[in-house]
Amino acid sequence: MSETTEHDRGLAVWPEDQGHVDELLYMARHLEKLYQQVELLGVGVDLKAEERPLLLFQGSGVVELRAGARTGNIGSRVMSYRVPNGSSYPDRTRHDLFVTEPGMQKVIESDGTAVITTQRVMYCSPNWNRSWEYSKAAEIFHSDYVGQGWAASYVGVSNRARTSGFMYRSGFARSVRDRLVLALAVADGTLEDMVLALKAERSEPDRS
């Protein structure tokens, strides 16, 4: 495999500072506590066997890419994580890719509730329901320019022709995306790899 491909495969999360690394590591080590906190709020949807919730938030929405929309690197800080066995996690997350054309996004609805679980992301409202299952996800990327004060995460799934995603307030973006990374690590069975990588990042904060 080429060096470029290996680098692309390793793009996973983008800690902004040492405090962010510590925050991610803490959450990865205390997942059961996170699950219980969300469950106490009342998820409001039926979960599958062994499915646990990581985040529940109101004021969400559904957004779709218009035909011809493109993604690209907007210069966000991206860290490449490696673990001792040379693997990376999770392969499907590309946090360096963002939708670069705001006008190419169509808001379907913006008045619902979203739940990030260890198996999928669900959006629910009185008029609209949608689910994005990680087992069917080929790619995941983001947009910081959906509309005034709105950001989104897109999940390209194999059972849906048009790429869609879920929206959230821009100030909430880091929390949502961190929980999504954790959820994918659990789903992919790479949580321990993630913990090892974060520990290594704490020891070598200036590693490229």
Image (tube, rainbow, N blue to C red):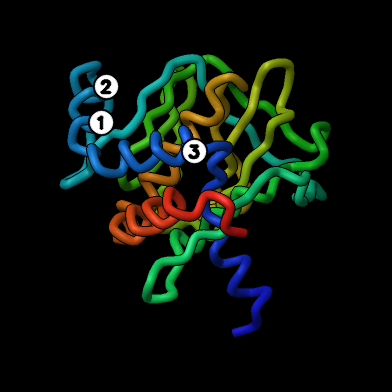
Element on which disc 1 rests? helix
Numbered label attached to residue 34? 1
Q: Quadrant of the N terminus?
A: bottom right
Do the CB atoms of the residues marked 1 and 2 lie less than 8 Å apart?
no
Q: Position of residue 197 (x, y in %)?
A: 41, 57
Q: Quick one: label 1 or label 3, which is nearer the N terminus?
A: 3
Element on which disc 2 rests? loop
Do the CB atoms of the residues marked 3 and 2 lie less than 8 Å apart?
no
Q: Quadrant of the C terminus?
A: bottom right
Residue type, label 1: Leu
Disc 2: which residue = 44
Residue 152 falls in which quadrant of the image?
top right
Q: Position of residue 188 (x, y in %)?
A: 34, 60
Residue 62 falls in which quadrant of the image?
top right
State the CA–CA distance, disc 1 to disc 3: 21 Å
**Visible in this render: residue 161?**
yes
Disc 3: which residue = 18
Element on which disc 3 rests? helix
State the CA–CA distance, disc 1 to disc 2: 17 Å
> In this rendering, which labeled residue sits more in front, label 3 or label 2?
3
